[in-house]
Amino acid sequence: MSDLRLIDHADWPAVHAVQTLAYPDFLHEPLSVLRDKQRLGPHSCWCARVDGRVQAYLLAHPWAGEDLPCWGQDGQPLSGKADQLFLHDLAIAPAAQGRGIAGRLLAAAEGQARAAGLSRLTLIAVQGAAGYWARHGFAPLALASPLPAAYGREACAMARPLLPA
Ligand SMILES: CC(C)(COP(=O)(O)OP(=O)(O)OC[C@H]1O[C@@H](n2cnc3c(N)ncnc32)[C@H](O)[C@@H]1OP(=O)(O)O)[C@@H](O)C(=O)NCCC(=O)NCCS
């Protein structure tokens, strides 16, 4: 049993704990960086409670142009008119994986992006998740410069157009 909601102030410690469970150390971002995503995307950062506690989240925010946001940094400005929803981080605690929760969070993001008039979803797949995203219609995205090594060797920028409903 799970329910989705926009992340509230009190949820952040639990969201940060999910990150610790879902990623290897080199992919952990400080809580300040995670929280800063909500500054850019106040209507597109969700968590999901599973069996009564937060065990999943999706942090996404509007973004503009061809250069994707930098990993591990807060305070990045939105330059220009947003044309995409950037999915910064989707993570499900291991105990809650395989129950369709990621799919529900992704559907919420898609709905929000459409409502905001954005034309595509973008992301950087890490730790072998490119296959997961490909199953959801994402394709590799050519960038002007290579991704920073901090993402790990398997990282891949990906995008999915949002066709009008
Ligand atoms: C990838 C992730 C978000 C999927 O969450 P989930 O809630 O288990 O996903 P769902 O239940 O909606 O979907 C599960 C399906 O996705 C598949 N899947 C999960 N991870 C996958 C991967 N890395 N590559 C391909 N398919 C994958 C499962 O095999 C399952 O397939 P099935 O429906 O045919 O059985 C979750 O495994 C996770 O949080 N991983 C750690 C953090 C991470 O890597 N996030 C993505 C960073 S870009």
Image (cartoon, rainbow, N blue to C red):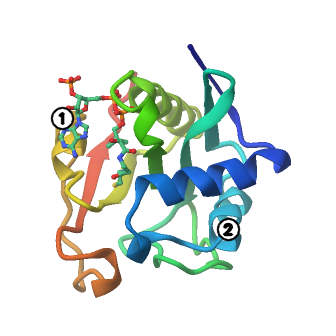
Q: Is mark 1 within 8 Å of ligand 1?
A: yes
Residue 6, above or below 85: above
Residue 3 picture location, percent across and down: 63, 21
Q: Is residue 162 visible?
A: yes
Residue displayed at 71% across by 37% down? 6
Q: Is mark 2 within 8 Å of ligand 1?
A: no
Residue identified by numbered label 1:
135
C-alpha span from label 1 to label 2: 30 Å
Instruction: Choose between 31 and 131: the one closer to the eye.
Output: 31
Residue displayed at 25% across by 57% down? 158
Identify residue type, mark 2: Leu
Q: Earlier in the sequence, mark 1 or mark 2?
A: 2
Q: Is residue 148 left or right of residue 68?
A: left
Q: Quadrant of the N terminus?
A: top right
Q: Quadrant of the C terminus?
A: top left
Residue identified by numbered label 2:
31
- For label 1, the SS is helix
Residue displayed at 80% across by 43% down? 8
Residue displayed at 46% across by 76% down? 71
Instruction: Choose between 58 and 53: the one closer to the eye.
Output: 53
The quadrant of the rendered image in which ligand 1 is seen is: top left
Residue 84 picture location, percent across and down: 45, 53
